[in-house]
Each structure stands twice: as C-alpha cells, then as structure tokens.
Image (cartoon, helix red, strand yellow):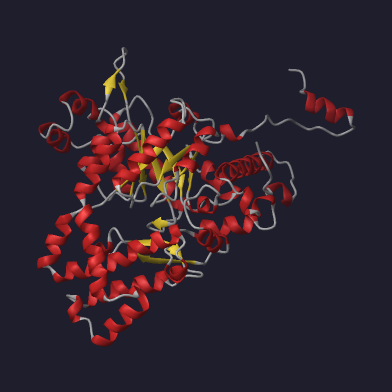
C-alpha cells in the first residue's frame, strides 16, 4: 500500500514517520445503525426539557444540523403541544428527524393517555418516554400503533419510542416485548388492532434505550460509568433471549457537559449521546434571560435535590440549581410540612404564617383558588378527591408552588427570582468551566448546534488522542484538551 499524502509530506519535511492512524470523524463516534435508522448525520440527541424549554426552534435547528431534538411537552396544555407539532411538521421536510416528549404522570393517567392520543393522531414519528416507573397503556400504545410487516416479513415501526431509564428493571421492561395482558386489554378497548398487538409481541417496546446517569430534573443520581455497562450487559442478555432481528440501541445521558464526558460515553459503548442541562443556556432555549444568566454561573456543586411537582406525594425528587435561588430549600420545607401534617388546618399558626409570607407569598385561600382553576381544566377528579381528602388538598396547594416556580423561570418573573426552579445537574458546571473565556462563552454564539458540534468535535479529538496513546505514541497533556471554536 502506498503511503498517504500526509505520511509523504511528513517524510519530505524530514520527520521520522513511524506509522499512520486513519482519520476519525464525529459521525463515526457512535452506532452507525442508530444514525441510519433515524436519518441523522451525527449520533447526537438534545433531550426534552419541560414547559417548552426545548423549543420548536431548538428542535428545528438540530434537525437541520443532522441531529435529533425532542420538544419539551411536559407541563404544557395540550393545545400548546399540538401547536408545536404543527410548527415542526411545517418547518421541516419529511427526511428531517424530530420528536416530542411523553412524560409519565402516575397521578394523572388520563392526561398521559390524552397526550399519547395527540401524538399518535398527529403522526409524531419519534417519542421520548421519560420518568416512567413501569409500562403503561399509553406508552405501549405509542410503541405498537402502526406496526406492520414489510414484504420480507420484518416488523416495521411507524413510531420510534425512545425510553429514558435509570434502573435495570425499567430498562428490562422497555427492552422486552409488551406484556400480553396489556396488549390484549388495548385490543379489547379498541386502542390497538389484533395485528398490531401480535406484532408488538415480536419486538421490544423501545428500540432505542437512553441510559440516564446523574442529570438535571428527574434522576436517580446514578454514575453513568457504572450504570451504562450494566444496562448494556442486560441488553445483550435480552437480545439473545428474544433473538430480535434488529439490535436494541443503547444511548447515554446525564453528566455530558464536556468533550471528555462525551468521549467517555462513546468509549463505554453508547450508540448515541443525549445532552440536557447544557442546552438551557443556548440561544434557542425557551427560558428567561435571567434564568440563563443564573445557569451560566453554576459550578459543579451548585445543585440540590428537591421535591418534584408531578410526583410530590410519592416523594420523588428532581435535581435543580441551588446557586442564586431558594427554591430547593423552600420546596423541601413544603414536603416536610406535607409529611408532618394531615391537613393545612393542622399546620401550626406560626408555620402557616411563615408559609404564606415567605414561600407562597399569598394566602392559602388565594392559592387554592388558583389551584382549583388549574385542575378544573386539567383533571377535575383531583378536585373531587381534595373535597374529601384534606391531605390531598394540601398537596395540591404545595404543588401550585412547585409547578409555578418553573413557569416563573421560563417567563422571567422579576419578583420571583429566588423561587426559580431550574433543572440542571453537575454537567452544567463542567460545561461552564470548559467554555469559560472561550469563543463559546459569548451567549450570542451559544446556539444549540454550536454546543453540539463543539462537544462532538472535541470528543473526536480526544478519542483520536487515546487511540494514539494506546498504540504507544507519547502525547503531551494538551492533546487531551479541546477549546471551543466556531464549527460549520
């Protein structure tokens, strides 16, 4: 084989060329089966962020860059979700991949069903299922609806379900075919055809499994370096057991804020990577300028776990920003009051005064009026339950604060800065340190596509450096760093 032009030039320059390593490209970092399945150039996904923080603009820019983004539908009224779907379908050609989030709402199964109805009716081809503790009729229907076979008898999906998991038992459920009892019930209800149910018994519920380590928002705080290999091994066992003709693809999320962490995820075997917290600082993110400023100042340790609005009564927590906001501390106080008392009336007068003055900044009566208005539109059953269960009424009052706090951050309410709920993990602190003083430090340049390209390019540079070092080539420390720059 003749030496390449680079080797020839090196020798002509008097260099002692001892070998040649073929080129490495960002497109090659993950599983090329993943990019082929979804028509992507890069194995890169920007995950959904609730309340529309992952905007249609963000999803559109990623699609045009050959990447995948999910619109953050959680917490939004269905007309807004439908409007977003209409906008995305109108802005992007059919060959561009995009998706929408379906979040698990265990206390509101009807809401989950209505969201699934909307996504299927509007032919959304990629759905990211997040925060699921178990399989539900809604998520199984999203997976199975539209299944058919091609002329060769292979099962073809109409809708691609991405399942975000952080526990092996949840991963196993999504990697396996849907339970027969659940499929049969959907057929009996007329929600699936018999043919769709039979085909669903031959394929996993989700072909794409996103393993989520320590992340912003809902998280089990698992280290990705231990969780991902565990789920990959589980995938291999389930793949052998069911003999799927198409391999289950396993991606990585959580803690990915630098080229080093992205390169590490691919080195562990990730088919694709999913970023989250870092995208809240992007120009296209649907969050206020003040919130972005607060997030851009965060460091690794500036996060805290706080009660989740959607699963408050279950004690589920989310990871949020601690620096510059008192939300985490105040939300914990609400949960302590909920755990310690059976009703709002049982809260001691002094504590109730402090609650209304410092946290709610309104009387309980005023907050309840707002909560009633919200639940009357969304799920009146919650109000009927509250009428006979004073503890549930207390939970709905406290959930008003937890839910409103994220909206205040989105809209930039200047009087509620100390109550902003900003979902983020330590990855954002690492990202801020990596970009400090660089081209990407300028907020005007920090687009979601430039963030993605720099993370991928940096991961490629680092991967190539590791390849050289593993071949015995001595390298300086600077070979393992990458400074952000404008990339096309």
Q: Position of residue 445 (x, y in %)?
A: 63, 48
Q: Nearer the viewer, residue 79 or 251?
A: 79
Up the image or down, 134 lies above or below 329; here it is above
Question: Which quadrant of the rendered structure holds the C terminus?
Answer: top right
252 vs 441, nearest the viewer: 441
Specify the farthest residue to the top. 151
| Percent x, y of residue 106 | 23, 53
Can you see residue 205?
A: no
Residue at 72% over, 51% down = 477
For the image shown, how many numbered marks are present on the structure?
0
Residue 436 picture quarter: bottom right
Choose top left, top right, bottom left or bottom right for residue 139.
top left
- Return the x and y of residue 230 as percentages of the image width and height: 40, 47
Residue 407 location, x and y as percent?
39, 59
Instruction: Residue 96: tell me if it is visible.
Output: yes
Tell me which residue sits at (73%, 41%) in the image. 473
Left or right relative to 291: residue 402: left
Where on the picture, by quarter, is residue 281? bottom right
Residue plotted at (53% across, 33% down): 64
Say above or below: 335 vs 252. Answer: below
Left or right of 464? Residue 122 is: left
Residue 57 as seen in the image, left or right of residue 311: right
> Which quadrant would the N terminus be assigned to in this image?
top right
Q: Residue at x 40, y 69 (%)?
A: 328
Picture layout, residue 219 above or below residue 418: above
Q: Nearer the viewer, residue 353 or 299?
A: 353
349 sits left or right of 251 in the view: left
């Amino acid at each position: 084989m003749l030496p390449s032009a680079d080797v020839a030039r090196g020798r002509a320059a008097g260099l002692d060329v001892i070998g040649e390593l073929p080129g490495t490209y960002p497109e090659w970092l993950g599983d090329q089966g993943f990019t082929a399945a979804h028509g992507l150039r890069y194995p890169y996904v920007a995950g959904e962020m609730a309340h529309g923080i992952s905007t249609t603009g963000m999803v559109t820019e990623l699609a045009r860059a050959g990447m995948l983004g999910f619109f953050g539908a959680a917490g939004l009224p269905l007309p807004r979700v439908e409007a977003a779907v209409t906008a995305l379908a109108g802005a992007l050609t059919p060959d561009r991949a995009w998706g929408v989030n379906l979040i698990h709402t265990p206390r509101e199964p009807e809401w989950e069903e209505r969201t699934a109805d909307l996504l299927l009716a509007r032919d959304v081809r990629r759905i990211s299922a997040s925060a699921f503790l178990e399989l539900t009729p809604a998520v199984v229907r999203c997976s199975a609806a539209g299944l058919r076979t091609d002329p060769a008898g292979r099962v073809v999906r109409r809708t691609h379900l991405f399942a975000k998991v952080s526990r092996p038992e949840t991963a196993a459920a999504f990697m396996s075919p849907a339970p027969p009892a659940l499929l049969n019930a959907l057929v009996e209800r007329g929600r699936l055809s018999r043919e769709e149910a039979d085909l669903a018994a031959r394929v996993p519920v989700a072909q794409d499994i996103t393993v989520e380590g320590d992340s912003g928002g809902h998280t089990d705080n698992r280290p990705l370096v231990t969780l991902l290999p565990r789920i990959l091994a589980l995938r291999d066992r389930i793949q052998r057991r069911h003999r799927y003709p198409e391999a289950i693809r396993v991606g990585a999320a959580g803690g990915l804020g630098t080229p080093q962490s992205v390169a590490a995820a691919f080195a562990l075997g990730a088919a694709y990577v999913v970023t989250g917290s870092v995208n809240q600082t992007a120009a296209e993110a649907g969050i206020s300028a003040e919130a972005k400023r607060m997030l851009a100042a965060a460091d690794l340790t500036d996060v805290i776990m706080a009660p989740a609005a959607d699963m408050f009564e279950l004690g589920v927590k989310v990871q949020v920003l601690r620096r510059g906001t008192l939300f985490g501390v105040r939300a914990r106080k609400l949960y302590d009051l909920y755990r310690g008392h059976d009703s709002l009336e049982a809260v001691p007068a002094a504590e109730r005064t402090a609650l209304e003055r410092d946290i709610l900044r309104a009387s309980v009566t005023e907050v309840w009026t707002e909560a009633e208005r919200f639940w009357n539109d969304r799920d009146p059953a919650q109000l009927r339950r509250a009428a006979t269960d004073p503890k549930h009424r207390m939970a709905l009052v406290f959930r008003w604060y937890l839910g409103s706090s994220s909206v205040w951050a989105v809209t930039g309410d200047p009087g509620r800065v100390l109550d902003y709920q900003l979902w983020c993990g330590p990855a954002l602190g690492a990202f801020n340190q990596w970009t400090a003083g660089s081209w990407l430090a300028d907020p005007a340049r920090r687009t979601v596509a430039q963030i993605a390209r720099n993370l991928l390019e940096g991961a490629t540079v680092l991967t190539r450096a590791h390849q050289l070092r593993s071949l015995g080539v001595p390298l300086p420390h600077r070979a393992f760093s990458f400074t952000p720059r404008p990339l096309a």
